[in-house]
Amino acid sequence: MFEKMFTTKMSSDGRELRLRFTKIRTGSNKRAKIMSAVMSVVVIFTTVCAAIAASAMDTADYGSEYGGAMYTLYAYPQEDMEYNVNDALGIYNEKHSLALLYPELSSIRYGYNLFERYFTPLLESSLDDYYLIDSEGGMLDFYNRQEPYYGVIKFWLPKDRSLNNLWEYFEQTEFKTMTIGGKELTVCFADGAVPYKDDAVLSKMIEKQILFELNYQDPDHSYNHYEYISEIIDKGVYVIRNVFPKKLIKSYSCFGGYYGDFTEEAIINDNVNTAYIRANRTNTFFSDWFKVPKNTDGNQAQKLCEVTVKPNECLVIDVKHTTNKMPYINYKLIAKDGLPFYSVISNDGSAVQPGETVEAHMMDIGGTRQTYFPFVNDGSGFTYEVWISGPESDYAELDIYTCKVSDNMNLASWDYQQIWHDLFTYDNAESRI
């Protein structure tokens, strides 16, 4: 689904936008980023599952770009160091503003239009400001698939407050100084992060990031990252704007498919979304470990199950565990009986014929939940075949089921969409359940 957002019209800057955008696909990842292999012998099944579970829970390698480490993106390698430092500090660069480069994406940060369906409206940040971290302060990504401990909104701002007006919107701030790798770093805890000023996990997060950045070398560009981060530390402030404990971590993206809406979130046991789903779960269609086929040329996907989504229900796919060999899976939904209504995205009045693909979804990593809501679901509901593949062939654990949304919602109405936003995004920090 995300791949269609990045077409050949994108310039070299598109790579950097894509890096920022796809981070949200792995719960703040850097890179963008399923079936039946039935076990017939219980002893073999138990042994394999134990080995898989151990592999799936590998400790993050914080020294790896794809193992829990986070860094400050050098967004415009074709520009000089000063330009990139200013960009990282949020000093306005008109030449590369999103509104000018990509008018179709101009409402990512603010505004209300069609693209609200693609991006969770974190009103106090942009997508690349939001991170999920583990209990050791490492970022969740393809190779660090642990349960999140905090959701964190953080970014850099200039020490000179006249250079970025976001300083004006902070209602409260607390500062502290940290010495890391021989550098003196100014950290600001703003608004919702103020109570976490002395939090040990956040201190680990900051230290891990700065130590990684001081030794990081970009594999694709030849700029000096040590000089880059040193300039940012000297001229800037490391700002943490908000911290969400895992109980209140909600969906970190909401986006549109062709015939329905998706939300994406981390699977967290003690969490308001998980509590809602447990209370309203209806039918289970698949729940097991299985060996995922490797997709070599687009034709290796395997049918895992059939799912009927009734009116006032949503489809939920929990990718509970994957392995380092195969950190993510891909899936597609095929309409068994067709879908006799037009696509909201294409707006061309087209219908899906029986056996045609309704939605395709890429790079769902272990520990994430995808929830899908058909736009117009009345009558007897819709039946989908779920087909799954992987970048490699390895074992994964999936849970596929439906969840009741409401008895009285018109699923085609904007009110429904807004209620869903309120419940499963940060628009409403308090639980509605």
Image (cartoon, rainbow, N blue to C red):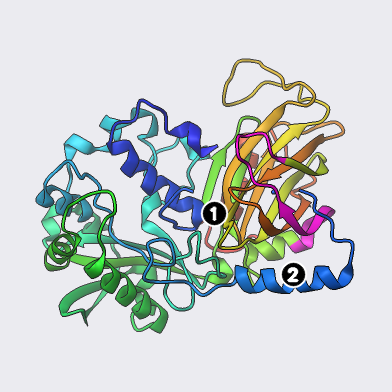
Where residue 230 appears, as percent x and y from the top left, is: 14, 66
**Quadrant housing the C terminus:** bottom right
Q: Residue at x 81, y 43 (%)?
A: 307
Mark 2 residue element: helix
Highlighted magenta segment, given as a residue range: 278-301
What x and y, as percent, mark residue 28? 44, 57
Q: Which residue is mark 1?
A: 425
Tell me where residue 414 sits by quadrant. Answer: top right
321 lies above or below 181 = above
For residue 21, side relative to residue 395 (left or right): left
Closer to the N terminus: mark 1 or mark 2?
Answer: 2
Magenta stretch containing residue 143, yes or no?
no
Any magenta on residue 285?
Answer: yes
In which quarter of the view is residue 346 placed? top right
Q: Residue at x 80, y 24 (%)?
A: 354
Label 1's element?
loop
| 335 sits left or right of 324 in the view | right
Q: In the rendered view of the protein, which quadrant contains the N terminus?
A: top right
The residue that label 2 is drawn on is 49
